[in-house]
Amino acid sequence: MPGFRLDDQQSADVVAAIRSLAEPSTAPDRETRMAMNVADPDRGRLVFRSAGCLGCHTRDLNDRSIRIRVHPDLEGLGDKRTFESVVLFLAGHSRTDPGRHRPELGLSTDAAAHLAAYLTSEVTDGDGEAEKSLVLGNPQRGKALIETVGCRSCHEIPGVMASTKAIPLNEDTDVQQGCLSADPPFGVPRFGFDEEQLQSLRTFIAGSSKTFAPLSAWTQARDALRRHNCFGCHSRDGQGGEQIGEQLAKFLAEDRELNALKGTLTPPDLSMVGAKLLPHSLDLAVRGEAPVARPWLSVRMPRFDFEAAEAQAISSYFKEFDRVGTEESDEKNALKLGADVGISLLGRQGFGCLSCHVLDGKIPPGGEEETLGPDLSLAHRRMSRTYFERWLSDPQRIIPGTSMPQFLVPIPGVEGTIQEQLGAVWDALGDPKLAERSSTSSRQFLVRQGDRAQLVRDMVVPEATPRSYYPRGVAIGLKGDRSLLFDSDRMSWIQWWDGGFLSRTKQGRLWEWHPEGRNLWATPEELPPVLLRHDDGRLLFPELRRERFGSFEELAFEGNGVRLRYDLYLPGQPSLRVSEVIDPTADGWRRLVEVQNVPEGMTPVILAVAGMSWSMADDHRATHQTNPVEVQIEHPGTWIQAINDSILKHSVLVEMRKQQRGSWSGALRVMIW
């Protein structure tokens, strides 16, 4: 905003003219009036900080920690606007101007009232004393002055026509006159340029032709992105988002209510957005008219009043800049698994997509906002298949740090390659009844009630184990603070501990669970929980397929304990069907195992514990001393010692007994002293 060297009387005349020319404001309707009556500035502060206003505005002129300022600082807005006028403006009831920099945020009437109360809560002119001291203005003189100095060249002013006279800027322009002079005369705008800025402008204009070449479409699009400050909120290719990011970082440390919304304040990354979204979907997104794919976000996508073809220029820029060629594929020979298989792969027995992604507006149980993914029911309408395949092949390549995993191996027990299985997922995303047919997520948080166990099925990070983390670990917390960890990816028991259950920490955008308390046992090698013994004494391991001994089927409560169901692969044979129940006891827990589909001539054997030296006793008891803890295992059956097996040496194996109807069962008890 330039200055014009107006004296007090001239300023008063302009003010009087603007007031006389102003159109009458819209009267608040009943709903707006009710919202105004209960408006709360504190709630408005939260709206201001969470809805995305910080992407463009600040509200503290004295805060020098914010390096980037794009649009006006809103401190002292109450001195310039009434509470009612701001409410009507924010709620969209008084939009009569085509201002390009005045987006609609889609606020509810209540939210608009709260925000207006906050923005106008500080008034600095006292009890009207400043108003009384002003010089009285003349509207007629003010209108003439407005036309003389050219206010209408930039502002919309009712009843004042814009000047049609344009001053040419080219090589013939005297660059020492007008607004380029060191001391512009009255009526000429004074922009406050320093000498270096003035000299840069003079050099540019002096070298300009009388006829300018038309700007390229990309230049126009980038200019529109800059003027609308799109990258004040959004990031793209590792840049952008500094305006909103800097202010949020400052406020999160001091605002407890805002901190509770931390996972809802980051706008979507626009990297490769032109390749990601279908053309019509991208057009809607730029105009702020697209369906909401991230319903958990507090930050909002504004709807701008674009100039003619401006939105289309932005869309075209993204489409052309991000365009990728279609890759050659073996789709002609690919196995078509179909949408039914794809729907099963979305759930807990597949890729676990529904543990993080919203589906039909519903947030998955236990979902953390910072790791939630867009609504999958919109994927087929929004996303191109080329991008879908490119994204899943390596999400980190497109958006480094994303919480989206990379899928490299197919799900065991489902036919097809990884590409064919992901193709089935794509087909499933296009099923109109996807939400009705999909299973629940693979992430589970089940809280203990009374003596009932508590369960967490998520990323578990134990210590002293073969791997540093287990993406689908099943942690079981029994009464008495005794806990077990099972890997539902590989089908292996991993760790026992007591004195606590789990604590949760955060690495980047991912939550991790860590065992608490003292370690009782940790396997040195991931082994299957059940083996088979031939009649001649040889042991048969379940078959490893893609680094997994089997597939996990079910996790459920069983009284005060927990039941696990899973299949174990056998070479050339149907899979073993295994059901385990972990029951708490006063001094530890009992493990009850039932197995079906056992081949003829073989006996199933429970791998009670592996990789530690246990002393065997004649009373069906094995003991291991770990100072200051003694762990004992007892059972009613027969011990099997695999002394000659390098993997199972010093392990404890329990032979199972055949029951009626062809099933086998076995039991053991773990006691902590």
Image: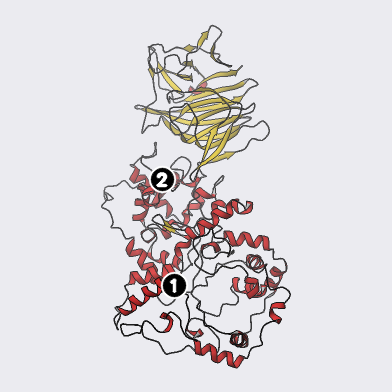
Which of the labelled discs sits on residue 341, or is there none?
Answer: 2
In the structure shown, which secondary structural element does the residue marked by tag 1 occupy? Answer: loop
Q: Earlier in the sequence, mark 1 or mark 2?
A: 1
| Crowd class of label 2 (few under 14; some 14 to 19; many from 20; radius 10 Å) | some
Q: Nearer the viewer, residue 544 or 262?
A: 262
Residue 94 position in % (x across, y down)? 59, 77
Quarter of the image for residue 575 reads: top left
Residue 610 position in % (x across, y down)? 46, 19
Question: For the residue marked with disc 2, what is the amino acid?
Answer: Val
User: Residue at (56%, 90%) from the top-left corner?
Assistant: 143
The residue that label 1 is drawn on is 194
Which colour assignment does the render follow?
A: secondary structure
CA gap, disc 1 and disc 2: 67 Å
The answer to whether marks 1 and 2 mark residues whose Cβ atoms lie closer than 8 Å is: no
In the structure shown, which secondary structural element does the residue marked by tag 2 occupy? Answer: helix
* Residue 278 visible in this rendered orientation of the protein: yes
Residue 604 position in % (x across, y down)? 45, 19
Question: For the residue marked with disc 1, what is the amino acid?
Answer: Asp
363 above or below 485? below
270 left or right, relative to 50 = left
544 above or below 366? above
